[in-house]
Amino acid sequence: MDKLQQMKASLKTLGLTHTREALEEILHDAQIKDLSYSEFLADIAGGEIKYRQDKATEKRVKEAGFPYPKYLSDFDTGFCQSLTAKQVRQLAELTWIDGLYNLILAGPPGVGKTHLAIALGYHACENGYKVSFTTMKSLIRTLRTWEIDKKSGVKMRRILASDLLLIDEVGYLPISAEDGNMFFQLISDLEEKTSIVITTNKGFEQWTEFLGDAALATAILDRLSFRCDKIPMQGKSYRLENHKSFFDEAEKIDTCTETERTEN
Ligand code: ADP
Ligand code: MG
């Protein structure tokens, strides 16, 4: 076994995966930059820590179950009339999760409720928080089946162990009394343990309507609202304002190719 292979075997035994995988590159880099012993060691330790942190973030993002990625950096506060850039920066500090605050993002379609919820969840994953994303429809299915279905059981345990639970599309579908009670039970179980972000198209006064029970709606809202910011996301639909047409796009591509053809 040559020296490089021996080093790789030792690094494997020590569990220094990143250093083992990038060994040639690390050694080459150290030579080129003429690093001192301490700089070299600091680079190795730093590289290993970053690799592990990235892996852990990747795992948290995967387990969170986001339907697609969305980022705070893409959230246009100029378009969103309900939150200032400063408020978005304050939310990005994530201290509201430590303080167990809930957020209710309420408003019509297309105003960025889901975008903001996913982006905050993603950012929380990057900062070491355990996050779960679910739609209300999927949550009800999980609550109904977690005791008998393995996949639902995993999801439920993940939710109960989360620092942050994102529940998208609350109020879109009416909920039976039994499902409503299970939802209330979950909210109670998470109290003092987990921050909850809810996106909804319903105002508080309409919760009775989709839950079909005034007492239940009051009990759920009472628990959610204790430490809570309700953000009324008003304004125009981003989708409608930034509407894209396939035919317009195709037309552009055709015109481009046409010009290229004439030029050639
Ligand atoms: P809602 O959940 O309120 O119906 P979404 O969050 O799904 O709306 O937003 C619809 C689309 O518009 C998404 O592609 C989203 O990324 C985009 N969008 C909405 N608001 C913004 C914003 N303020 N900045 C950037 N993109 C936005
Ligand atoms: Mg949405």
Image (cartoon, grey):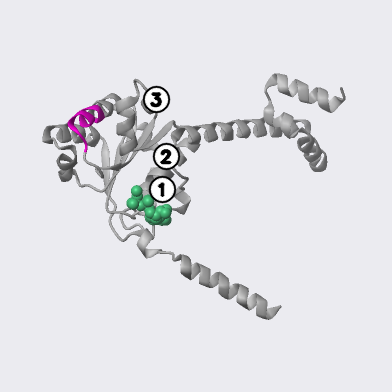
- The answer to whether residue 177 is magenta is yes
Q: Residue at x 20, y 36 (%)?
A: 221
Answer with the quarter of the image where residue 159 lies.
top left
The picture places residue 94, in percent across and down from the top left corner, at 40, 38
Q: Residue at x 21, y 40 (%)?
A: 174
Report the amino acid beneath label 1.
Arg
Circle 2 crowding by C-alpha within 10 Å: few under 14, some 14–19, many from 20: many
Answer whether residue 214 is visible to the viewer in this image.
Answer: yes
Q: Secondary structure at mark 2?
A: helix
Q: Nearer the viewer, residue 147 or 3?
A: 147
The residue at which mark 1 appears reads as: 89
Distance Cα–Cα, label 2 vs label 1? 14 Å
The picture places residue 141, in percent across and down from the top left corner, at 32, 32
The residue at which mark 2 appears reads as: 121
* Mark 2 sits near ligand 1, with its Cβ under 8 Å away: no
First to last magenta residue range: 175-183
The picture places residue 49, in percent across and down from the top left corner, at 62, 31
The residue at which mark 3 appears reads as: 161
Do the residues bearing badges 1 and 3 touch, measured as CB atoms within 8 Å?
A: no
The furthest residue to the left: 214
Which quadrant is home to the C terminus? bottom right
